[in-house]
Amino acid sequence: MEFEGLAVQALPERLMKTPAFVQALAHRIVDLGMSGDETVDFVLGTIFDFVSKGGVLLDAKGEEIGIDDIIECFSEEPRRWINSTKKWASKPPKQRLQQRCVARVTFIYLAFQIVDKNFVSVPKSTGEKSQAA
């Protein structure tokens, strides 16, 4: 499988909640040039393709994230939320990201990690992670 033994890993929540991180992610979303619907389809398609080809999603602690989590995360009005998030590209949020939004931001970040090929390897024998070449 194309991504067997490779993973993408989320950043710690405290970093992903910062206004600077959220604004940088908003810039990436805007740069896609997609509608909210298309952006959600991009995120879901990228992640599902990666996982279906053997890739693994990891949280900041190195624990595997289940694919059901992404389905649940994007089931409640995500398209409207993404369109609102795009506004932060030009005007950063005044406060840290709310906890209820962290999962969506995590999956959007992981989708961009996949696109950027910013993988970590996960040796099956030790469970340790190291940067993949």
Image (cartoon, rainbow, N blue to C red):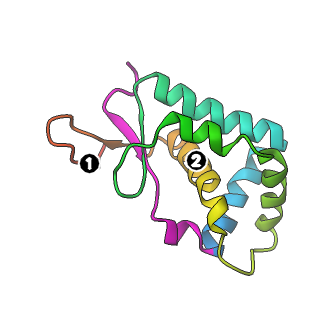
Q: Position of residue 83 (x, y in %)?
A: 84, 53
Element under label 2? Answer: helix
- For the record, the magenta segment spans 1-18
Residue at x-position 57% and y-position 46%: 112
Mark 1 neighbour class, 10 Å CA radius: few under 14, some 14 to 19, many 20 or more: some
Task: Find disc 2 in the rendering and name its residue.
Answer: 107
Q: Quick check: is 10 in the magenta stretch? A: yes
Identify which residue, 79 or 33, lies in the foreground: 79
Distance CA(mark 1)–CA(mark 2): 20 Å
Q: Which image quadrant: the C terminus? A: top left
Question: Is 126 left or right of 118, judged from the image as shown?
Answer: left
Identify which residue, 43 or 66, lies in the foreground: 66
Q: Outermost residue, left direction? A: 125
Mark 2 neighbour class, 10 Å CA radius: few under 14, some 14 to 19, many 20 or more: many
Where is 55 relative to 131, above or below? above
Q: Amino acid at mark 2?
A: Phe
- Residue 68 showing in the rendered view: yes
Q: Position of residue 51 (x, y in %)?
A: 47, 29
Question: Is 102 left or right of 132, judged from the image as shown?
Answer: right
Where is 128 relative to 89, above or below? above
Residue at x-position 51% and y-position 70%: 15
Identify which residue, 58 or 100, lies in the foreground: 100
Question: Is 49 left or right of 34, judged from the image as shown?
Answer: left
